[in-house]
Image: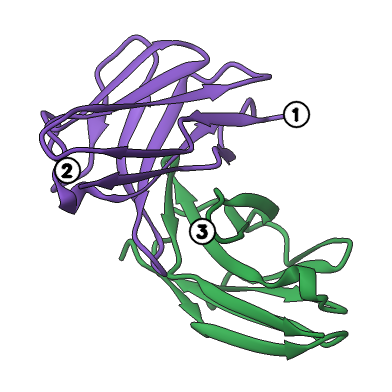
Chain colours: A purple, B green
Amino acid sequence: GAVVSQHPSRVICKSGTSVKIECRSLDFQATTMFWYRQFPKQSLMLMATSNEGSKATYEQGVEKDKFLINHASLTLSTLTVTSAHPEDSSFYICSARGVDGETQYFGPGTRLLVL
Amino acid sequence: QQQVKQSPQSLIVQKGGISIINCAYENTAFDYFPWYQQFPGKGPALLIAIRPDVSEKKEGRFTISFNKSAKQFSLHIMDSQPGDSATYFCVGSGTYKYIFGTGTRLKVLA
């Protein structure tokens, strides 16, 4: 149980284009999902907290107009990187808060490369 | 005050040995301390978790020791195996937000 999927697993795009990443909780409902970013050999950095049916809460320094988050259902949250640039290249990981209200279950991650 | 300090940064252990990773926190509002294991190119996977009202928790070869007064906790991996080679993250959680440690890269030699 508590499986989270992400799609796509890898994406390469041209600078200036937008990329959408999907995060799904497969066997449980998640009112809260989280989006993280991880650079090579570094820890996870929380970008935003996504609550179903309401606006996402962004961490300090994260541009909300660049990283659009939508949590339209209890099993799906999406992250759209708008007007992507090479510096946005990173490993993006989502998580969903489990039914215990505490534990986060992570997706497999999405590798984004912006050329 | 929000930081979780993790050490060592990297660790090499012989097969069958004990791997020990330490973490320290300052925020007394933290009330949940999970550990995650991450393989290259994958998302973190929950390994084991503890709450501050318990001093030790064991699941198979993995044990968390928790010292509330010192605000420290550690992960012990007994009988370490090459398949345990991964990056391990400790986490302090309070107000439902995770604060990750900096990570420990463990390599278990065959």
> Which of pointers 2 and 1 lies earlier in the amino acid sequence?
1
Q: Is residue A79 above or below residue B101?
A: above
Determine the residue positioned at 29% across, 13% down. Answer: A54
Local crowd at mark 1 within 10 Å, few (<14), some, or many (≥20)? few
- The kind of residue on which mark 2 rests is Val
Q: In this view, does A56 lie above or below A59?
A: above
| Element type where label 1 sits in the image | loop
- Direction from residue A29 to residue A73 in the image, left or right: left
Q: Which chain carries label 1?
A: A
- Direction from residue A9 to residue B108 in the image, left or right: right
Q: Nearer the viewer, residue B55 or B10?
A: B10
Q: Mark 3 points at which residue?
A: B91
Q: Quadrant of residue A100?
A: top right
Separation (CA) of disc 1 from disc 3:
21 Å
Q: Mark 2 points at which residue?
A: A62
Q: Mark 1 points at which residue?
A: A1
| Element type where label 3 sits in the image | strand
- The kind of residue on which mark 3 rests is Val
